[in-house]
Amino acid sequence: MIEVKDVTKVYKTKNGELTAVDHVSLSIQKGEIFGIIGYSGAGKSTLIRLLNGLEKPTSGSVVVNDLEISSIKGKELRKARQKISMIFQHFNLLWSRTVAENIAFPLEIAGVPKAEREKRVKELIELVGLKGREDAYPSQLSGGQKQRVGIARALANNPEVLLCDEATSALDPETTDSILSLLSDINERLGLTIVLITHEMHVIRKICHRVAVMQAGRIVEQGSVLEVFRNPQAEITKNFVMQVSDSREAKEAIKHILKNYPAGKVVKLTFVGNTSGQPVISYLIKEFQINVNILYGNISETMDGPYGTLIVQLDGDPENVEKAMEKLKTMNIQAEVITK
Ligand SMILES: Nc1ncnc2c1ncn2[C@@H]1O[C@H](COP(=O)(O)OP(=O)(O)OP(=O)(O)O)[C@@H](O)[C@H]1O
């Protein structure tokens, strides 16, 4: 569906050349929700603009839907772009137009007749849950409602790909979740391919199937979301995973327990998929006659199944604690000693 092959984008700036995207290759399947995560300045926005032809690569090629976006221009590019829509962090709505008129705008540009336009706008308003708000102006809407208008407008011309540029970064956590659910619902219902860029691992966890981690213009790691959560390789990926698994309370709890209970080992267990349903703790206690002190627990859903973290203190006969650690490995549970 989307093939990015060895793409580099170099900007010429006052201070010389700046490589914003550096030899990036990606392959995104039809119907997939693909996330690109990175800190500010990593090159995410440049990469996403290369996908819809707003930027041209310095070298390499971008193919979307069998069309080489990186080499077409003018009318051909404008036509291709109708099938590659985008939503933005700050919504980019037309403030003097109502909700319905904003959604109708791309249809007007595409020359869709009035009657058909009105029918389509009505469908889209229902799809994004804005019934009753057709005549409101953007300034009268909440952030979440504004993004719903952005999504409806982006879907107006039945795109094949939806690009989301930090689409939930200006929203509070609850509204973020409702917009992410809407995107996931649209992906399932319409089979729409979604590519999103974000700096929040929560967004990746919640709706993406696969993720690429970007740093200094390069993709440093990519894979299925569950796999990346289970076994992050790059240091930056570990930091992103920590955003959603190791809360400040957990760190506080660990500090406290280490001070008060210096014996044994503090171990972080990571469960993925069906391993998160196993009665591991009671098994360890019974089988190895050790004490298992639960310090912190957290379980979250990803698109491909649950992902959980449990921080425990294992105490008792050191030999049995070792055996318990060995056993955990055979149960496909990641066990990492945090402190001895
Ligand atoms: N048009 C441009 N001209 C010159 N430099 C640019 C241009 N656009 C981006 N850059 C530079 O390229 C690098 C990558 O920027 P980019 O906006 O793609 O990163 P990002 O990961 O999206 O970060 P942010 O979330 O802050 O936008 C940055 O150093 C930025 O200053």
Image (cartoon, rainbow, N blue to C red):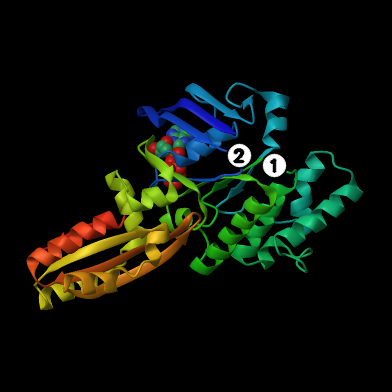
Distance between mark 2 and mark 1 Cα atoms: 12 Å
Whether residue 312 is visible, yes or no, is yes
Give 92 or 49, whichever is nearer the viewer: 49
Q: Quadrant of the C terminus?
A: bottom left
Viewer-side label of 2, 1: 2
The residue pinned by badge 1 equals 159
Residue 269: x and y, percent?
Answer: 27, 62
Q: Quadrant of the N terminus?
A: top right
Q: Is residue 18 above or below residue 309?
A: above
Residue 86 in the figure: left or right of residue 269: right
Number of on-image labels:
2
Determine the quadrant in which ligand 1 lies: top left
Give 76 or 324, whichever is nearer the viewer: 324
**Residue at 17% across, 66% down:** 266
Element carrying mark 1? loop
Q: Which numbered disc covers residue 30?
A: 2
**Residue at 35% across, 29% down:** 15
**Residue at 61% across, 44% down:** 31
Quarter of the image for residue 270 reads: bottom left
Q: Is residue 284 above or below residue 128?
A: below
Mark 1 C-beta closer than 8 Å to ligand 1: no
Whether residue 98 is visible, yes or no, is no
Residue type at mark 1 is Pro
Q: Is residue 29 above or below residue 175?
A: above
* Neighbours of disc 2 within 10 Å: few (<14), some (14-19), many (20+): some
* Neighbours of disc 1 within 10 Å: few (<14), some (14-19), many (20+): some
Q: Residue reaching furthest bottom?
A: 260
Residue type at mark 2 is Lys
Looking at marks 2 and 1 on the same chain, the residue that comes earlier in the sequence is marked by 2
Residue 39: x and y, percent?
Answer: 38, 47
